[in-house]
């Protein structure tokens, strides 16, 4: 018997018992759809994290100055000198001062709005574009002027898009809006990247009470050599402080790599758990094929009496199990795409983040191949039982 004939017979038997065949495939369908959605979710989360780090600046190093273990201090001019002295590794630097306090517009309080003191090069470091007005200048920092640049959300939500020249009260001090940034997100939201206010770092340091700058953002020449740049900066800081407890240098690229590895491990574990349902589906196929062998015992006896060899009977039932599983796999792929689309819509609507659940071609091919393999593996035992039936006993079977 040719394989094509076995394939045709398998389709005929599936059509004969449509409901039973569908219920047999159900475990495979759910298993493949689950694996597709989980892997697609992992791909979407990885892409989302990469985009977010691109906004933060994956080509940057963040330096925290603690001063522990050293009597020396590091002022912004000294940090600028360290960066300028090594053009092979570094491009630019901006001091950063995070302010925690009340932001007021008339009687309204902006609790979720971030306030950061930055240098004049901060916006170019972050690749932020101005929508209107100007950025921070050198003299704004030198003279500790009370001016600010605001994100698009603050401008549109609180000033109806007309913010230049308006004032904002931060920790009791009045600041004049001199610039508005372009939106970094498709839909700016409260507490997001565009809900931000930027001041001269010298002014922010004065408002913070300490008067010191303890954080810096440094851009590196290439992400490919992030480790080298990080080591070079650590060495320069060690030469200055003579203690490696006085500072901490964090690479955004390293953080992204660590988070990606952790995410991949988590997604792999979840995919394996979801894959258990594929095994359950395989058990269902085996049970149904055993029932099918019992129902068709007389048919098997007639075929063997007419000269059908054991390998033909074996191949017929194995192919039937594989076809059943493969059809279930095809339905599972379609269902997986549908569930991925629904999951994407729910994530965007509920979490308000642009995260897309995107199954890869590799995951789809793996899922389909796994479904066909499961059909063959779990269909072999019933097929073997059918092939070894005694033709005389089979013909007597009622």
Image (tube, rainbow, N blue to C red):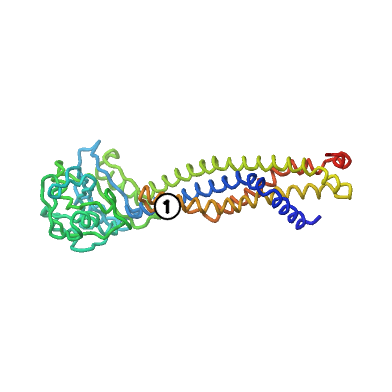
Measured as percent of width and height from the top left, residue 66 is found at 24, 40
Q: Nearer the viewer, residue 286 or 217?
A: 286
Q: Quick one: quadrant of the N terminus?
A: bottom right
Which residue, as the protein is rendered here, is positioned at the far top? Answer: 69
With 360 as the anchor, is 180 left or right in this view? Answer: left
Q: Quick one: quadrant of the C terminus?
A: top right
The residue pinned by badge 1 equals 345
Please tell me which residue is depicted at 23% across the width and 39% down the height of the picture: 67
Q: Nearer the viewer, residue 246 or 188?
A: 188
Measured as percent of width and height from the top left, residue 16 is found at 71, 50
With 322 as the anchor, is 50 left or right in this view? Answer: left
Which residue, as the protein is rendered here, is positioned at the far bottom? Answer: 132
Measured as percent of width and height from the top left, residue 84 is found at 25, 56
Q: Quadrant of residue 288?
A: top right
With 1 as the anchor, is 286 left or right in this view? Answer: left
Local secondary structure at mark 1? helix
Q: Residues within 10 Å of mark 1 (few under 14, many from 20)?
A: some
Q: Nearer the viewer, residue 202 or 150?
A: 150
State the count of labels: 1
Q: Nearer the viewer, residue 344 or 170?
A: 344
Measured as percent of width and height from the top left, residue 233 is found at 31, 49
Please tell me which residue is depicted at 23% across the width and 55% down the height of the picture: 151
Please tell me which residue is depicted at 76% across the width and 56% down the height of the picture: 3
With 121 as the anchor, is 371 left or right in this view? Answer: right
Is residue 392 shown above or below 161?
A: above
């Amino acid at each position: 018997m040719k394989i094509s004939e076995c394939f045709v017979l398998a389709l005929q038997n599936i059509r004969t018992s449509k409901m039973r065949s569908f219920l047999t495939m159900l475990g495979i369908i759910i298993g493949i759809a689950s694996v597709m959605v989980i892997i697609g979710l992992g791909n979407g989360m990885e892409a989302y994290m990469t985009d977010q780090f691109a906004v933060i600046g994956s080509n940057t190093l963040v330096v925290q100055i603690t001063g522990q273990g050293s009597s020396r201090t590091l002022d912004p001019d000294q940090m600028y000198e360290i960066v300028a002295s090594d053009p092979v590794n570094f491009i630019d630097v901006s001091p950063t001062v995070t302010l925690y306090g009340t932001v007021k517009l008339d009687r309204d309080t902006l609790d979720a709005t971030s306030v950061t003191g930055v240098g004049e090069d901060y916006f170019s470091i972050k690749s932020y574009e101005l929508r209107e007005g100007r950025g921070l200048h050198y003299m704004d920092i030198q003279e500790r002027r009370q001016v600010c640049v605001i994100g698009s959300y603050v401008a549109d939500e609180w000033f109806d898009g007309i913010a230049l020249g308006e004032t904002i009260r931060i920790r009791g001090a009045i600041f004049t809006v001199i610039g508005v940034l372009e939106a970094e997100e498709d839909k700016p939201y409260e507490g997001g990247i565009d809900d931000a206010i930027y001041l001269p770092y010298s002014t922010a340091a004065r408002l913070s009470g300490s008067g010191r700058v303890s954080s810096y953002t440094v851009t590196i020449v290439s992400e490919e050599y992030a480790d080298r740049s990080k080591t070079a900066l650590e060495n320069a800081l060690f030469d200055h402080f003579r203690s490696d407890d006085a500072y901490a240098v964090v690479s955004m690229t390293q953080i992204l790599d660590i988070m990606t590895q952790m995410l991949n491990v988590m997604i792999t574990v979840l995919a394996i758990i979801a894959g258990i349902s594929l095994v359950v589906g395989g058990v269902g196929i085996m049970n149904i094929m055993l029932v099918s062998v019992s129902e068709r015992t007389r048919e098997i006896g007639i075929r063997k009496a007419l000269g059908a060899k054991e390998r033909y009977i074996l191949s017929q039932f194995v192919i039937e199990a594989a076809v059943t599983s493969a059809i279930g796999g095809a339905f599972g792929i379609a269902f997986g795409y549908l569930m991925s689309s629904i999951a994407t819509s729910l994530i965007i609507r509920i979490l308000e983040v642009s995260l897309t659940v995107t199954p890869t071609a590799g995951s789809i091919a793996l899922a389909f191949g796994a479904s066909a393999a499961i059909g063959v593996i779990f269909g072999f035992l019933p097929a073997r039982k059918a092939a070894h039936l005694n033709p005389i006993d089979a013909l007597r079977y009622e």
